[in-house]
Amino acid sequence: MRQCFTLRAPVTVLQGVGEKKAQAFARLGIETLGDLLCHFPRDYEDRSHVLPIAAVPAGEAACIRAMAAGEARLTRVRRGMELVRLRAVDDTGAVEITFFNQSYRKDQFRTGETYLFYGRIEHNGARRTMTNPEFEPADAAGQVTGRLVPVYPLTAGLSGRMLSAAVRQTLDGCAEVPDALPEPVRAACGLCPAREAFEQIHFPTDLAAVSRARERLIFEELFVLAAALEQLRGQRAAQPGVRYTQTDLSAFFAALPFAPTGAQRRAIAQAADDLCSGRAMNRLVQGDVGSGKTLVAAALAYLTQQNGLQAAFMAPTEILAAQHFETLSALLAPLGVRVGRLTGSMTAAEKRRARQALAAGETDLVVGTHALISGDVTFARLALVIADEQHRFGVGQRAALAAKGRQPHVLIMSATPIPRTLALMIYADLDVSIIDELPPGRQKVDTFAVDSSYRPRLEAFIRKLVGEGRQVFVVCPAIEENETLATPLRSAVEHARALSETFPELRVGCVHGKMKPKEKDAAMAAFVSGETDILVSTTVVEVGVDVPNAALMIVENAERFGLSQLHQLRGRVGRGSHKSYCVLCSDAKGETARARLRALCKTSDGFRISEEDLRLRGPGDFFGARQHGLPAMHIAGLCTDTRVLQQAQQAARAVLARDAALQAPENAGLRRRIEALFAARAQTFS
Ligand code: ADP
Ligand code: MG
């Protein structure tokens, strides 16, 4: 009987998918049949050409068609190692097939049957051998060998063949594969229909078909995203923002302890123009670590107060919120701005009072974390939201903010330099100010890449610097639970203990992600105030923390960090008048790893580093766990051709220009996809 599924059905509707297997699918992020179709192969193996055994060149992977010439035999060698051996023959020769530690293979062959084997053939004198090949009976139904075979990202309990079978069932069982591309767009761009694309990406007839399918799916993904952004932009243009009328910043500038840089002045002027335009501002301020972005925020918060309105400043962590509260209070309170704070570590009573002050309009600027714009916080006259170190404040979050029925001005600040293609996608609905100038007098941070043999010298250097009154950051990679690695990684806690033993005369503090916010704050505060000399931490110090007295940043297992991340870490020192250093410790031997660290020693330009990072690591890792706030891209890599992106953007604009609400029947698929996109994002936001 032919079944009928929709793509929203859970994978358990498939035959042979029970609870256990559903869990394995879930580990791959696959819950529904739709997810399953979007679990794309990461590569293909060409098993379409079956070669005679004698014709396979040494060391090459190939598909052979051979008969089991006898029983498969199980032998035990050395401690616990089991081998299953099978001799297989065709007209041209014989090959000895070995499976390691897969004793169950012994019973999977029948003498005289013919099988397709896929694997690497080695020549051993006249002998031919093949180890752990993939295989199946030559006449099996739904046969995958002997053609172009998809290679999927897999997990324990799910083989590539099981995935293929599940996808096959889905495609056969779904009467309709919804298409997010409106028919006219699809036809105009010469792209294939959705069903065909899915069919070919999973069961390709040849490589040309794969690239046609990819082309279509990439286009679709970018098109949906572009359309979503275009809709946001449209909604924004339709919604007026509070118009500021007071624009005099002279008192603010006069009160500064330093002269703002030209770039800071420019960014402030651009944003101030937005605030006076009557249209809601959506501006990104991008500038390398230490370029002084906080000043831009302070200037705008001041203007907001001058206009009798309220501003909210959101930091990514409690520690940063505390620090920004200090900085902004020091700068703005003398000018009459009432600065408040709202963070998770405050007592219930403190929070209540802070909320009341906001609701009553008695606070002009509130500093806190993302909790500020979620849930039960009400503002009397919220006009400006500032998001610091924004990579977590993406498209969907902005959509959610708009959906709350308020349309405050939004200023996003980021030190993460973003390669151009990426910026086009993430910030397509934003205006951008770039701070490309560091405050005068900044010294270059001398950077060194060293291995363990350097440790005694490093210890002497720590003693010397601390003896001169400086402080030291030591960063260890965050260690995920049940991570097993060949090389011992330095965990923050253990390393802090080791350092206390090495330096009994110094005070060593420790901060890591598993600590309670209160403990974290206390340890951080002790370092900021100079009570501790050395602060060992995971990357919680990555963004924004300002300790001008810190002159040395040591990164352990530096090979575990992204270049941009290391650059951010390095930006934690060299913020005061002291000559500062960054030491990257790594025993990694690989040439790429060494090359990456060398690149960092050579340059201090954040944009150059980000391009290099993207080139060396590929886009997948770029921000770590999807910090860019973009919906997960299944297929369109973040390095995708700008041309396709622009084409998709143009097409999306044209569709929305004709049908802003996407009411036309041909746009229904697109409308549903955009709704799903925002729904998924809004959830992660709250
Ligand atoms: P980031 O862009 O990384 O957020 P901050 O705003 O934290 O940078 O500024 C880094 C440091 O530079 C702070 O200590 C700040 O007081 C100082 N600073 C900012 N602007 C200037 C300036 N124009 N002249 C001198 N120092 C400045
Ligand atoms: Mg900052």
Image (cartoon, grey):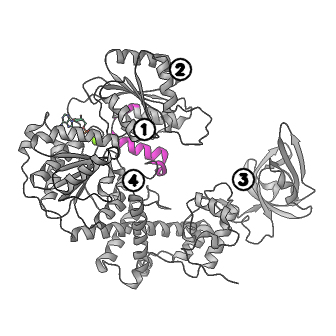
Determine which residue is flagged by label 4: 628
Q: From the top left corner, tell me how far across and down residue 534 is, in percent.
A: 39, 24
Of badges 3 and 2, the one in the foreground is: 2
Marks 1/3: CA distance?
43 Å
Q: Quadrant of residue 604?
A: top left
User: Which of the marked residues, 4 or 2, is nearer the chain's N terminus?
Assistant: 2
Q: Residues within 10 Å of mark 4 (few under 14, many from 20)?
A: many
Q: Which mark is residue 539?
A: 1
Secondary structure beneath dot 3 equals: strand
Look at label 2 and name its amino acid.
Ser
178 in relation to 587, above or below: below
Q: Which mark is residue 453?
A: 2
Q: From the viewer's side, name the closer residue of 562 and 148.
A: 562
User: Which of the marked residues, 1 or 2, is nearer the chain's N terminus?
Assistant: 2
Looking at the image, in which quadrant does ligand 2 appear?
Answer: top left
Q: Residues within 10 Å of mark 2 (few under 14, many from 20)?
A: few
Look at label 4 and name its amino acid.
His
User: Which of the marked residues, 1 or 4, is nearer the chain's N terminus?
Assistant: 1
Look at label 3 and name its amino acid.
Ala
Name the residue located 76 percent from the left edge and 72 percent from the top edge.
Answer: 141
Q: From the top left corner, tell me how far across and down residue 45 is, in percent.
A: 66, 59
Look at label 1 and name its amino acid.
Thr
Name the residue located 91 percent from the left edge and 51 percent from the top edge.
Answer: 73
Q: Is residue 390 visible?
A: yes
The residue range painted magenta reads 601-628
Q: In this image, 170 relative to 126: left or right?
A: left
